[in-house]
Image (cartoon, rainbow, N blue to C red):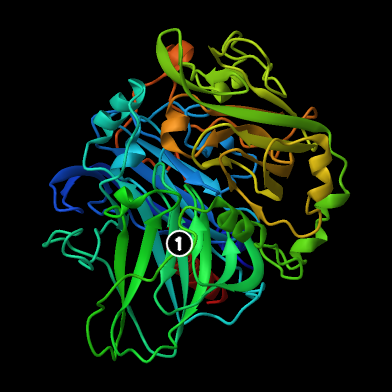
């Protein structure tokens, strides 16, 4: 008969096996990032940019559906920091959203550990710093969420995966830029457009000075690559194209699309797309990869990003003019292109069932908001932007913390569902969303430039857009079958865009202008979505929460290094660690049993 010690070992082994199997299904991936200023000269002018682990842009965060992601962030900047995850949904966990309404900023010199699960999600996204205009200095990087192996891709597996980060870029510091915006000074023409942090290839000696490093994408002839292209800039709509190559659109912000070929694609601020590009040219020379501003005049020509696509058998460098862009200043071309993007309703994504099994067009709308933006205007002597006449004022105590501790007077649930004919004001006014309700939001753009709007925590359905003023009759033009689901949509000047969103994700979620100048001056609102029943699935207050504002007295001194008790006890090689421990336990178990037999 086995000894008590061997029985305990056996029992422990069984428990450990259960633990291993549980975590093996949803593994953890761990990242340790230091955010700091580094020196760079992307446009030939030396400046400070925000790097992560000394890299600009930052590293790619790579995970798979349902994985748990742990990112320890050390803030080595000289001001507070938050990182937000553009399009990553954080199911019922708005604590990890990385915006001022849900988290206190990470003070300079401190660290904070984000932990979230990429639940039921696939696709191409990016992260960036959300405070103090820091995005204009960098701090951004790509996010890839892969399919689980049991869910096939709706296309052949590509031969390579390439992330492209496009950004309008200014050689002035982000601190100077935000002062300009505060003083009502327009950002003006960017000094350039960067591709993966590099300046333009010298395609024109009169427009591009010598000595600028440029991006080279190396490819093999005949192979097909997945290009994940993100506009991580601050204010400029960009057209992306690759000379002599078709862009086969397959995914945008977590949704597989109807597969269509495009010669070029307008990518507005905050938007992400995946294209399959086949290397089917004869490689007599290299080819241009171009990102150029849209709806602008020739004074913007110097602000063109150019990289090089280099076949391994290329016979010479790229030369000659860039591939032309038809309809450079024609918003109708861009709108028709946007309307052509459709949801692939027959493809599975994070789950095996088809994307179209969620029939959004059959759901009854419970709330309607018509949101009107306005260009910057003086309110109480300061330049502000508004949505429905309200310029959002971030409180010193984050909304989510105020909700958690029942702190009164921090915010009001009185955001108007339409523009009110009254003087604009600065206020902390929230939308009170109905849990499991179905909200229709119409963005009406009264500004003179394309504006994009993003909603954290959700993918919404883009069901319609048109020029002019939205009316009740506009609903007759809605696409209620295969409008693409995404998290960021453009609204053209003098036009409207309508979205539908199912409010099934409890939390407090940021709805904002992605154009940084508009956002910084107040074009944002939060949507509170509360489950009226006790919701044990919504994540609780993190153990490592930072306290500020009215709750500052709760803050304890924190260690400025990663503490596993604050995050996950498992890192990216958790399976290996667990397997090794299992082997030790099994060996110990059999040794105990053998001792008893002897």
x%, y% of residue 308? Answer: 29, 73
Q: In the image, 520: left or right of 76?
A: right
| Residue appearing at x 29%, y 88% in the figure | 312
Q: Is residue 323 left or right of residue 202?
A: right
Reply above or below: 343 against 153: above
Q: In this figure, which residue is indicated by the disc labeled 1?
A: 229
Front residue of this view, candidates 560 and 202: 202
Residue 19 visible to an observer of this rendering: no
Residue at (45% x, 57% y) in the render: 328
Compare residues 327 and 312 and report the one nearer the observer: 327
- Quick one: 207 or 195, which is closer to the camera? 207
Instruction: Please state the horizontal and vertical placement of residue 509, each as a whole percent of the image.
Output: 60, 33
Crowd rating for badge 1 (residues with CA inside 10 Å; few <14, some 14–19, many 20+)? many
Q: Is residue 561 above or below residue 358?
A: above
Residue 215, above or below 270: below
Residue 93 rendering spot, x and y as whole percentages:
60, 39
SS class of the residue under badge 1? strand
Q: Is residue 369 above or below residue 379?
A: below
Q: Residue at x 82, y 61 (%)?
A: 357
């Amino acid at each position: 008969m086995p000894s008590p010690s061997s029985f305990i070992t056996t029992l422990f082994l069984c428990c450990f096996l259960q633990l291993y199997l549980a975590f093996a299904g949803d593994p953890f991936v761990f990242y340790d990032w230091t955010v700091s200023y580094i020196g760079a000269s992307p446009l030939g002018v030396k400046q400070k940019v925000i790097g992560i682990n000394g890299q600009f842009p930052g590293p790619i965060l790579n995970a798979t559906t349902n994985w748990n992601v742990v990112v320890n962030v050390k803030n080595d900047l000289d001001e507070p920091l938050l990182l937000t995850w553009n399009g990553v949904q954080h199911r019922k966990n708005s604590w990890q959203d990385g915006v001022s309404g849900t988290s206190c900023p990470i003070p300079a010199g401190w660290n904070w550990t984000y932990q979230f699960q990429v639940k039921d999600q696939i696709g191409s996204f990016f992260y960036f710093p959300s405070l103090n205009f820091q995005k204009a200095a960098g701090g951004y990087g790509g996010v890839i969420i892969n399919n689980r192996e049991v869910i096939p891709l709706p296309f052949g597996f590509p031969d390579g995966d390439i992330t492209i980060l496009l950004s309008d870029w200014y050689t002035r510091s982000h601190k100077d830029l935000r002062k300009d915006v505060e003083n009502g000074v327009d950002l003006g023409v960017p000094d350039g457009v960067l591709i993966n942090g590099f300046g333009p290839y010298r395609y024109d000696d009169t427009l591009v000075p010598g000595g600028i490093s440029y991006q080279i994408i190396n490819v093999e002839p005949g192979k097909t690559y997945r290009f994940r292209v993100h506009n991580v800039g601050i204010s400029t709509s960009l057209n992306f194209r690759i000379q002599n190559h078709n862009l086969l659109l397959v995914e945008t912000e977590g949704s597989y699309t109807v597969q269509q070929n495009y010669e070029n694609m307008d990518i507005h601020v905050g938007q992400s797309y995946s294209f399959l590009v086949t290397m089917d040219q004869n490689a007599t020379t290299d080819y241009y990869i171009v990102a150029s501003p849209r709806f602008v005049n020739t004074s913007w020509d110097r602000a063109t990003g150019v990289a090089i696509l280099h076949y391994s058998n290329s016979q010479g460098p790229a030369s000659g003019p860039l591939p032309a862009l038809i309809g450079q200043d024609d918003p109708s071309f861009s709108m028709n292109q946007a309307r052509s993007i459709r949801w692939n309703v027959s493809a599975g994504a994070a789950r095996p069932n088809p994307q179209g099994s969620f029939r959004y067009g059959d759901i009854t709308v419970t709330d309607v908001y018509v949101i009107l933006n306005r260009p910057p205007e003086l309110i109480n002597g300061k330049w502000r932007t508004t949505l429905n006449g309200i310029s959002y004022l971030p409180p010193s105590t984050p909304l989510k913390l105020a909700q958690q501790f029942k702190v009164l007077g921090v915010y009001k649930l009185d955001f108007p569902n339409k523009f009110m004919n009254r003087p604009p004001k600065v206020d902390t006014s929230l939308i009170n969303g109905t849990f499991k309700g179905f909200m229709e939001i119409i963005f009406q753009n009264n500004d003179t430039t394309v504006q994009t709007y993003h909603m954290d925590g959700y993918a919404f359905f883009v069901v319609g857009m048109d020029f002019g003023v939205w009316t009740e009759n506009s609903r007759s033009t809605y696409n209620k079958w295969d409008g693409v689901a995404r998290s960021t949509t453009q609204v053209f000047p003098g036009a409207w865009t309508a979205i539908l969103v199912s409010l099934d994700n409890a939390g407090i979620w940021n709805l904002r202008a992605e154009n940084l100048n508009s956002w910084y001056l107040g074009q944002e609102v939060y949507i509170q979505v509360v489950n009226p029943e006790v919701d044990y699935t919504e994540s609780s207050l993190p153990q490592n929460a930072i306290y500020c504002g009215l709750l500052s007295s709760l803050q304890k001194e924190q260690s400025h290094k990663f503490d596993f008790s604050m995050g996950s006890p498992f890192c990216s090689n958790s399976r290996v660690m667990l397997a090794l421990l299992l082997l030790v336990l099994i060996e110990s178990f059999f040794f105990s049993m053998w001792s008893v037999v002897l």
